[in-house]
Amino acid sequence: MKTMAYLSFLLAVFLLIIGSSFAQDTTQQKSCCKKEMKEMNEDSHHNMDMDNSESKHQNMDMDNHQPGEQSILREGEIDLKGIDMNKDGKVYQDVMDWNVISDTPGECPVCGMELKEVSLEKATENLIKNNFKVK
């Protein structure tokens, strides 16, 4: 009987260690992406201070688009219908960085993952679930 209690105790400790390790890995991944976004924002703001007013808008693009093109890294209140330029009811969204949304296929400028095609309804659901504001 003591052996069963001891084995149960060891199993519980093992599962606790594995569970906390998994949670820590997930937290590190999220903090890594948030850190990269923060650094990109800081670089963008630094560049804006140094440049003249004509080039300020070009430096706000965080994903190396050509001047005049809009960044797919969305901030503030996100207008999905406005992003859906071809009006097919679908957009491409990153499954790690939910505010990276485009009307065309591509990859996330933050983490490099391929964007996944989703309906506007699913994109809205993903954004709300992850505390983003949707227009």
Image (spheres, rainbow, N blue to C red):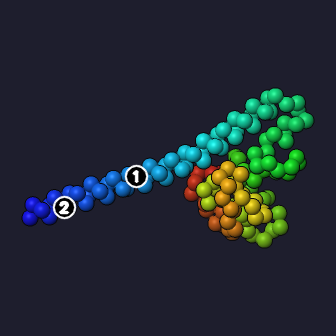
SS for dot 1: helix
SS for dot 2: helix
The kind of residue on which mark 2 rests is: Leu
Q: Residue at the bottom extreme?
A: 88
Quadrant housing the N terminus: bottom left
Mark 2, residue position: 7
Q: Position of residue 128 (x, y in %)?
A: 60, 56
* Residue 115 appears in view: yes
Residue drawn at (75%, 69%) of the image: 89
Residue drawn at (81%, 68%) of the image: 87
Disc on res. 128 = none
- Label 2, label 1: how far apart the Cα atoms are: 21 Å
**Compared with residue 50, is residue 97 higher up or lower down, i.e. above or below?**
below
Residue drawn at (74%, 34%) of the image: 45
The kind of residue on which mark 1 rests is: Ser
Q: Position of residue 29 (x, y in %)?
A: 54, 50
Q: Position of residue 25 (x, y in %)?
A: 47, 51
Q: Residues within 10 Å of mark 1 (few under 14, many from 20)?
A: few
**Compared with residue 123, is residue 97 higher up or lower down, i.e. above or below?**
above
Quadrant housing the C terminus: bottom right
* Residue 134 appears in view: no
Q: Nearer the viewer, residue 63 or 91?
A: 63
Mark 1, residue position: 21
Side (left or right) of 58 relative to 21: right
Question: Mark 2 or mark 1: which comes first in sequence?
Answer: 2
Q: Residue at the top extreme?
A: 50
Q: Residues within 10 Å of mark 2 (few under 14, many from 20)?
A: few
